[in-house]
Image (cartoon, rainbow, N blue to C red):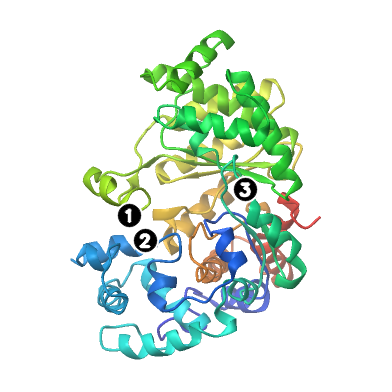
Amino acid sequence: MSLLDDDFLLGNDTAKTLFHDYAAKMPIIDFHCHLNPEEIYENKNYPNITRIWLNEGTYGDHYKWRLMRANGVDEKYITGDGDEYKKFIEWAKTIENSYGNPLYEWTHLELRRFFHIDEELTEESAPRIWEKANELLQTDDFKPRNLIKNSNVQVVCTTDDPASDLKYHKLLKEEEAQSGFKTLPAMRPDKLIQIDRDSFGEYLKTLGDVSGVEINNFADIVKALHQRFEFFNDMGGRLSDHSLLTYHFKEASDEELNAIVNKGMQNEALTQDEIDQYLTMLLENLMKLNAEFNWTMQFHINSNRDLNRPMFDKIGPDTGYDAVGTQPDIVSHITKLYTKMQDTHDVPKSIFYSLNNNDWMELATMMGCFQGETVQKLQLGAGWWFNDTAEGMDNQLRIFAQQSLLPHFVGMLTDSRSFLSYPRHEYFRRVLCNFYGKLVEQGRVPNNEEKLGKIVQDIAYNNARNYFGFLD
């Protein structure tokens, strides 16, 4: 078998048939990513492959940055102001040492699918690839909107603060017929969750101004959030997303909550119990709002961020200094939250991603206790971040299948800041087809091509379309 040939990751004839004849051709719904809607709207060509691959627009690819540091690259050529050609050469030297890392496969998939470059990226080949890629990057096909459309993407859901005016979503909505895909907002209230930050009081004022609600207490926060849900919903929003690095279920009375909010607004020190109380009551109300608007609530849990404090102080968050979280009882506290909300019939559609795969079985079995009303109302999300590997994806599929109904799974998302990340959907679809191919080979499911073909097509696209309702 040659590198990334037509059948890579496909271990038997059934897997090959399922992928090539069924899954490969399906459109993409990318329901969680970190693309910048402003860059989608402005639709400008990137000057070179370093800009679109390593330091893209407003963001950068911290997956790649971690590997470059492991390869001994000077930070000047990672996040610094080093020459962009030299940065690309350093990435090529890094990728030569990355056999077995998914970035090796993703890198070459992107070279092949977008640039039609079959050559392995090495220090020796890098100058040729630099020249060819940069020439193509100046063509219309490599403008952001065409990169999305030509990847067969129908919906892109960005990640947006509740206080956002969604300016670029409005502009993109006006041009939707021309672009050929939808760009929709998804609400991520990180700044509202971070009551212990010095900026919390100022953020509440911003949220109050944009929502038309003067925020003086917790009830005002909920009122402002309701207005923002209405606004996002009118703009096509159908999901929220919540990052819980750690979580402890601890409720509070209205009086306690107002006192906690007042302390947060005044930048007074908060105890851990007070932070837990505020977060629990905020999540309860967010669950009610998600249920009211028939949205899907996503949880990204158990990550450990910004471990290298000197580098965090120097270059900020999301720069490659994060790790798997280790709160062993986080799912038990989430279970308490869902048990409470089940009593009031306020459990929304939910997707859980944990960075610690030791949580997956507990999450999958917990979700089984709160299913009903909607097909696969609660879902174990695709392998996230450090689990976004062939083996991580296969493990997630196995647990989902064994503990629930995998044919109802809403499938893959890029979770990416890059317009070149859509081959990750192909990668996932290959793993998915191989998963079912193995079950056929082992005699564990019927060798029914038509039925299995429909299942992989549903997981690749149809389930997400039906579950989220973006295209209704």
Of the image marks 3 and 2, the number of the one nearer the N terminus: 2
Which element type, helix, strand or loop, lies under badge 1? loop
Residue sitting farthest toward the top: 255
Rounded to the nearest angstrom, the CA distance separating label 3 from label 2 is 23 Å
Q: Which residue is mark 2?
A: 63
**Residue type marked 2:** Tyr
Q: Which residue is mark 1?
A: 320
Rounded to the nearest angstrom, the CA distance separating label 1 from label 3 is 24 Å
Whether the residues at callouts 1 and 3 have beta carbons within 8 Å, the answer is no
Rounded to the nearest angstrom, the CA distance separating label 1 from label 2 is 7 Å
**Residue type marked 3:** Ala
Counting other residues with Cα less than 10 Å from the Cα at mark 2, is it few (<14), some (14-19), or many (20 or more)? some
Number of marks present in the image shown? 3
Let me know if residue 312 appears in the view. yes
Q: Which residue is mark 3?
A: 186
Counting other residues with Cα less than 10 Å from the Cα at mark 3, is it few (<14), some (14-19), or many (20 or more)? many
Location of the N terminus by quadrant is: bottom left
